[in-house]
């Protein structure tokens, strides 16, 4: 596919700006170097925080978290993307701050342990521990992007509680076989190719049939309200369609909205691209409706 024709100028500029941080000699297995590059890239796109929003670092269930906004009855728990190997509280700081300001709900960002130092189920265990602790006194919305969305989907499919209100997942990996459909159509998509996707999956070592590792293996008949926001030009796009169809067969309604003309990682483009800005506004509106 010729993405120079498929994507608009703003998205192409964002892609090129992102790639400019990655030197040609960056080694795939050099995780200190990979994380340093990723962190510099994320810092470059950081859009600042809304004025007056209370933000502080803490621990919940002994897991490091960053808390955005005042106390609220509904809490949005957010798990960042980064292929389970990259990112943290800083990489998605502005995204979480803007969600908190837009929804007037508290957002809790979880600094879960990363691979390859901590293999599955470390990240799942960390996020679930935070969710369970918060669920004692709050209603919970699960949210996240990419790998973080996969963690949240795994929790939604394995942990049932009256406190679990909804999940809102952004370009999620949902654990289907990486073949056919969008895995072929967008095998060479910008910012995430099929080959890169497979390399991150190999790092995690999550068993294929384990619902704590793969949302598609969970109890989809027990899902909370679910909204999925895949990117059009992304090898994992059709995971969302498969998940929706599987959930509907199990008697649950899952809504999918494709971000047209967007690529994996478009969240960082929300202040550079009209399409990304519109999609982020749609997601924030949905979250506002859920928590109100």
Image (tube, grey):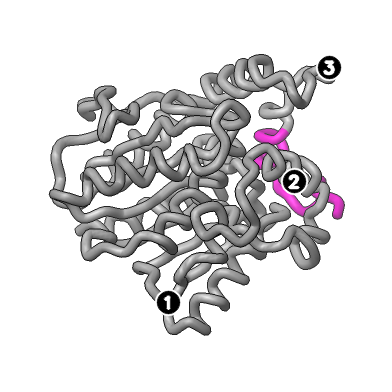
Q: Nearer the viewer, residue 44 or 240?
A: 240
Identify the residue position indicated by label 1 in the image.
221
User: In terms of depth relative to the viewer, which is nearer, 234 or 224?
Assistant: 224
Q: Position of residue 247 (x, y in %)?
A: 50, 76
Q: Nearer the viewer, mark 3 or mark 2?
A: 2
Image spot of residue 2 (x, y percent): 86, 51
Location of residue 223 with respect to 117 vertically, above or below:
below
> Who is closer to the viewer here, 76 or 289?
76
Magenta stretch, main secondary structure class: helix
- Is residue 269 visible in the rendered image? The answer is no
**Residue stretch in magenta:** 1-15
Crowding at dot 1, Cα within 10 Å, few <14 / some 14-19 / many 20+, comes out as some
Mark 2 vs 1, N-terminal side: 2
Closer mark to the observer between disc 3 and disc 1: 1
First-in-chain label (3 vs 1) = 3
Local secondary structure at mark 1: helix
Asked if marks 2 and 1 touch (Cβ < 8 Å), the reply is no
Question: On the image, numbered disc 3 is attached to which residue?
Answer: 25
Quadrant (top left/top right/bottom left/bottom right) for the N terminus = bottom right
Pointer 3 with pointer 2, Cβ within 8 A = no
């Amino acid at each position: 596919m010729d993405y120079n024709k498929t994507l608009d100028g703003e998205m192409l500029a964002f892609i090129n700006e992102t790639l400019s941080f990655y030197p040609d000699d960056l080694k795939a297995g050099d995780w200190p170097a990979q994380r340093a590059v990723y962190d510099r890239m994320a810092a470059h796109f950081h859009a600042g925080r809304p004025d007056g929003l209370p933000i502080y670092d803490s621990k919940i269930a002994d897991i490091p978290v960053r808390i955005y906004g005042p106390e609220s009855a509904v809490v949005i728990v957010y798990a960042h993307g980064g292929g389970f190997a990259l990112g943290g509280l800083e990489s998605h700081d502005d995204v979480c701050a803007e969600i908190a300001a837009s929804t007037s709900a508290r957002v809790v960002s979880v600094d879960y342990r990363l691979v390859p130092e901590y293999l599955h189920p470390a990240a799942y265990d960390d996020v679930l521990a935070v969710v369970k602790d918060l669920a004692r006194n709050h209603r919970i919305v699960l949210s996240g992007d990419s790998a973080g969305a996969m963690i949240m989907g795994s929790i939604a499919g394995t942990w049932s509680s009256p406190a679990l209100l909804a999940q809102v997942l952004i370009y999620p990996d949902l654990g289907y076989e990486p073949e056919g459909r969008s895995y072929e159509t967008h095998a060479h998509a910008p910012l995430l190719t099929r080959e890169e996707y497979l390399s991150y999956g190999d790092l995690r070592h999550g068993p294929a049939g384990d619902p704590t590792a793969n949302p598609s293996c969970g109890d989809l008949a027990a899902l909370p309200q679910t909204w999925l926001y895949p990117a059009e030009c992304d090898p994992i796009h059709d995971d969302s369609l498969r998940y929706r169809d599987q959930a509907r067969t199990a008697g649950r309604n899952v809504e999918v909205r494709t971000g047209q003309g967007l690529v994996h990682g478009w969240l960082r483009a929300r202040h550079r691209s009209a399409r990304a800005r519109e999609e982020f506004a749609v997601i924030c509106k949905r979250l506002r409706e859920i928590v109100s």
